[in-house]
Image (cartoon, rainbow, N blue to C red):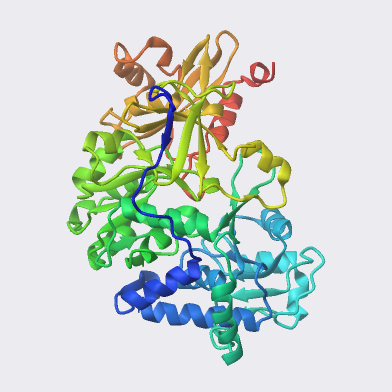
Amino acid sequence: MTSPALSYVTGQSTQALIGETIGLNFDRTVAQWGDRPGLIVRQQGIRWSYAELGAKVDAFAAGLLALGLQPGDRVGIWSPNNAEWVITQFATAKAGLVLVNINPAYRLSELEYALNKVGCRALIIATRFKTSDYVGMVNTLAPELARALPGRLTAEKLPKLEMVVEINANPSPGMIPFHSILEMGAAAHHERLRELASKLQFDDPINIQFTSGTTGAPKGATLTHHNILNNGYFIGEAMKLTPQDKLCIPVPLYHCFGMVLGNLACTTHGTAMVYPGEGFDPLATLQTVAEERCTGLHGVPTMFIAQMEHPQFASFDLSSLRTGIMAGAPCPIEVMRRAVDSMNLREITIAYGMTETSPVSFQTSVDDPLDRRVSTVGRVQPHLEVKIIDSEGRIVPRGMPGELCTRGYAVMLGYWEDPERTAQAIDAARWMHTGDLATIDDEGFCNIVGRIKDLVIRGGENIYPREVEEFLYRHPKIEDVQVFGVPDPRFGEELCAWIKLRAHEHLTADDVRAFCAGQIAHYKVPLHIKFVESFPMTVTGKMQKFIMRDEMTRELGLQEAKTA
């Protein structure tokens, strides 16, 4: 028997795992809650019941089969949030196709790599989004489209791609209009869809998500029905979702946050999915919550900050809110407290995980005491195992930091056609090594203390930037802060803080150091302090500290020390 003093936990539950495909589970939802609101998309003026959404999903799935796509084929989607994305997510699952999520921020070389890496036969695209001209970029990579019959593309740079579907009533030459696929399925295709329902297996790969690594080419995390359907279900259970709830989802669908913590948490509970816009906009999100009387709201910390700092924030009635998830990046305790107090999110939860684990491993519960909900990422999710290990692979005692490893139904099949990097991430005992530093206390609550690569070692002292960030968030004039290490010829590394102030506030570097004096150890006080208007981050709101570190290294003339 494992000693209770060790950092090893298992998720006990009286609820069994769901042993069916996404398609069968979605059909069950449509049958049970067909008359309930299913999908509301503000920017498109769409309000569909689950029955209406289900009919469109079936029509599109049959249309995909009519195009000649076969189970196991890869279908890419390159689009911001819209109703077509949701239809595609569930239709591809029902047809046994592998949905390949492509980051809306990708440019030419990234798109070419992603499509060729997994061999997409079809690609569904929006016309454009913000500064991204999707049609233009696809035509640049595949100029053959202009003279190709729709669905019969032969492109030199994209040899596997045969069809490009545009979410536009009047698509560009060579592209298939999205809406036409809804009408392509004949009786035989619908019959084929019914046959597939009993043949598809829940361990089949159904989704590929590219992880945005800081070095090397992106890796295609390959996920199954079983992975993401169950994770979505237990995430919804932690929020106590019901068919009476409406969840506002301003996070991107191409990422697990949108399609699993959002969509699948909703569909497994009959909850309405509500989209406030194509991409995150704080005002549109606040308007949507107020207008639709949403009971749940998702977001990364920077999204909640942007809403609470919005000049019109106080004018919105957010009293309908109850729950939601703050995740995707370390959640500052002070930001959590403000969200609970000023946005009525009394049952908000924090979730922790990574794409490779479908994604959530830990989540707080609405029943957890507030101090635990705002200061930890909760306890291990049902049916999962987690251990914290030292650099030699040994499980550490409770309360000691080490690398967090996850095992269980949620761990991905692997990186698509990349056995070498899969073996680096998943060991022989099927433990997924996250690269995150964490502690687990005696009650099983987990704290993420940083990334292994973010750990700062200053003169032999280990410094976890997260701890310093949490302290600086207490300053009433600081809106957001990121702390990281930069090279130092004397100590090896020194701390640097990038600070974003609240509107109309002023601070100096000396003010910040004075705030720290006597409150945190002297070696944790940032030596370098820079005031900024924004931070480099991914589309999903993850801070890119490596960019900040590189910029400060150059700015401070520390390049030589860095490479010495």
- Residue 139 visible in rendering: yes
User: At 74% from the left edge and 75% from the top edge, which residue is drawn?
Assistant: 145
- Which residue is nearer to you in this view: 221 or 555? 221
Q: Position of residue 142 (x, y in %)?
A: 75, 68
In the displayed structure, 281 sits above or below 145; it is above
- Residue 529 visible in rendering: no
In the displayed structure, 105 sits above or below 536; it is below
Q: Is residue 403 left or right of residue 155?
A: left
- Which residue is nearer to you in this view: 166 or 462? 462
In the displayed structure, 390 sits above or below 272; it is above
Q: Is residue 429 left or right of residue 461?
A: right
Q: Is residue 447 left or right of residue 432?
A: left
Q: Position of residue 302 (x, y in %)?
A: 38, 44
- Which residue is nearer to you in this view: 162 or 429? 429
* Residue farthest bottom in this picture: 187
Q: Position of residue 192 (x, y in %)?
A: 60, 83
Q: Position of residue 426 (x, y in %)?
A: 62, 39
Q: How many marks?
A: 0
User: At 68% from the left edge and 18% from the top edge, which residue is drawn?
Assistant: 560
Q: Is residue 6 left or right of residue 75?
A: left
- Which residue is nearer to you in this view: 358 or 160? 358
Q: Quadrant of the C terminus?
A: top right
